[in-house]
């Protein structure tokens, strides 16, 4: 339910999909840039999904992609200044949306929910022999 509302608000307010927001968030948290494979692993999606999103973001001037010197088939992706500014604006609004949607929870309840969701994520990853990134 929360995800559906966030998707709608991103689309209506910024004409951005949740996967695009997620890619920008991953890159925002890696100012030195990330490989395309690194973005895929961080978001737990296929390389193909990330490639299409990054190509669109690049056309819009929000990310820069450059080949890695040691292997020109691999690319390092990072947000441009415009991409960083756009993400910061969306992220601030996103934070307000989530806080508003969860405002009925006490601080302790919100902390406990966060802990339980983290535990659930680790359990899922462990069941597939993966590690948290």
Image (spheres, grey):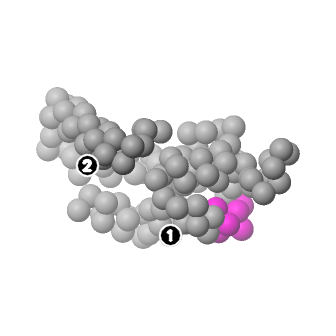
Tell whether 50 sits left or right of 108: right
Of residues 72 and 2, the one nearer the viewer is: 72
Q: Position of residue 95 (x, y in %)?
A: 38, 46
Q: Is residue 30 visible?
A: yes
Residue at image coords 58%, 43%? 28
Q: Residues within 10 Å of mark 1 (few under 14, many from 20)?
A: few
- Over which residues does the magenta segment extend? 54-61
Residue at image coords 17%, 29%? 108
Disc 1 is placed on an element classified as: loop
Of residues 48 and 4, the one nearer the viewer is: 48
The residue carrying mark 1 is 15
The residue carrying mark 2 is 100
Magenta stretch contains residue 60 = yes
Using the image, determine if residue 120 lies above or below residue 54: above
Tell whether 77 sits left or right of 97: right
Dot label at residue 94: none
Of residues 43 and 17, the one nearer the viewer is: 43
Disc 2 is placed on an element classified as: helix
Residue at image coords 40%, 51%? 94
Distance from Cα at disc 2 to Cα at disc 1: 21 Å
């Amino acid at each position: 339910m929360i995800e559906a509302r966030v998707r709608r608000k991103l689309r209506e307010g910024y004409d951005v999909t949740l996967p695009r927001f997620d890619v920008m968030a991953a890159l925002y948290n890696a100012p030195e840039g990330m490989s395309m494979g690194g973005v895929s692993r961080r978001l737990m999606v296929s390389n193909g999904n990330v490639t299409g999103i990054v190509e669109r973001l690049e056309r819009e001037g929000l990310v820069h992609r450059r080949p890695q010197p040691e292997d020109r088939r691999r690319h390092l992706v990072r947000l441009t200044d415009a991409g960083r500014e756009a993400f910061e604006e969306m992220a601030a609004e996103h934070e307000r949306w989530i806080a508003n949607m969860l405002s009925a929870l006490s601080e302790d309840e919100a902390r406990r929910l966060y802990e339980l969701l983290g535990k659930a994520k680790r359990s899922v990853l462990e069941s597939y022999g993966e590690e948290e990134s």
